[in-house]
Amino acid sequence: MPLFLCQTCSTQFAESAAPQPACPICEDERQYVPARGQQWTTLERLRGGHANTWRALEPELLAIRSVPAVGIDQRALLVRTQQGNLLWDCIALLDEATITLVRALGGLTGVAISHPHYYSAMVEWGREFGVPVWLHAADRQHVMRPDPCLRFWEGDRQPVLPGLTLHRLGGHFAGGTIAHWEAGAGGRGALLSGDILQVMPDRKHLGFMRSYPCLIPLPPAEVQRMAAYCEGLGFDAIYGAFQEREIVAGAKAALAKSAARYCAWVSGMVEP
């Protein structure tokens, strides 16, 4: 039976003879169902009309993105280390070219995902490379295709490779996760943030929202907590979820400044 994919968010569902009447990920207030209504596709159909592009962000950090765009149009990041490679966040398209390239680069040791909007075809990736897919247990209810490769972790911190640690930051989702890469940014440290910390188009600021498409803000106290948590991590760069959404230097100061700006506006401390 086919494994249907939601065209709007690219979440892959468990095998079924027919697609679900709705996608719970898109029905949630943090996402949306487009005006044309719920639409479905499959991985096989994507392989017929899409391809993955690759871009080097650092010597050991590669971005993978599908063209034409699929779903939310997020990118996956491949972090290479001497102890193995981690795929950060996920995209729906896994084709033979991508499999060949990833294996040529040393394969994968694991997959880790920031939040349910990027679960996508995570089980395909985990099964293909025989690795665990790390998800925070607080978001377990959003999994649409259960599988033994899914590894649910709890608490606020989870090492996945030497020098690569997952941190539960919350905010956008209860289990919203970022990855701290100690060797990133030339050894100054980097955060892989998805859109738990949303790098803005100016690449100088970050945004914090419960829902980006529906413009539902987070409480200032939650953003202050998130910023304070990140202050304890060593980093100078932040790599976000979308193409050209990265702050390659001065990211810690940018995060503190952005959180203060956000809280001032949402709290009504700034006059329009």
Image (cartoon, rainbow, N blue to C red):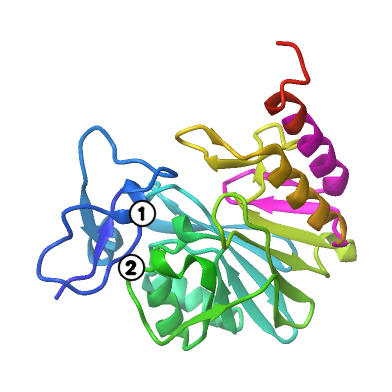
Estimate how packed mark 2 is, as few (under 14), some (14 to 19) or many (20 or more) residues with alpha carbons within 10 Å.
some
Pointer 1 with pointer 2, Cβ within 8 A: yes
Q: Which residue is mark 1?
A: 25
Helix, strand or loop for disc 1: helix
In reply to whether residue 238 is colored magenta, the answer given is: yes
Callout 2, which amino acid? Met
Q: Which residue is mark 2?
A: 144
| Mark 1 → mark 2, Cα distance in angstroms | 9 Å
Helix, strand or loop for disc 2: loop
The relative height of residue 165 versus residue 256 in the rendered view (above or below) is below
Q: Which x, y percent locates residue 18? A: 11, 64
- Residue 21, image quadrant: bottom left
- Residue at horizontal 82 percent and vertical 40 percent from the top: 254
Which region is colored magenta?
A: 233-262
Q: Which x, y percent locates residue 211? A: 50, 41
Q: Is residue 249 visible?
A: no
Q: Is residue 91 left or right of residue 77?
A: left
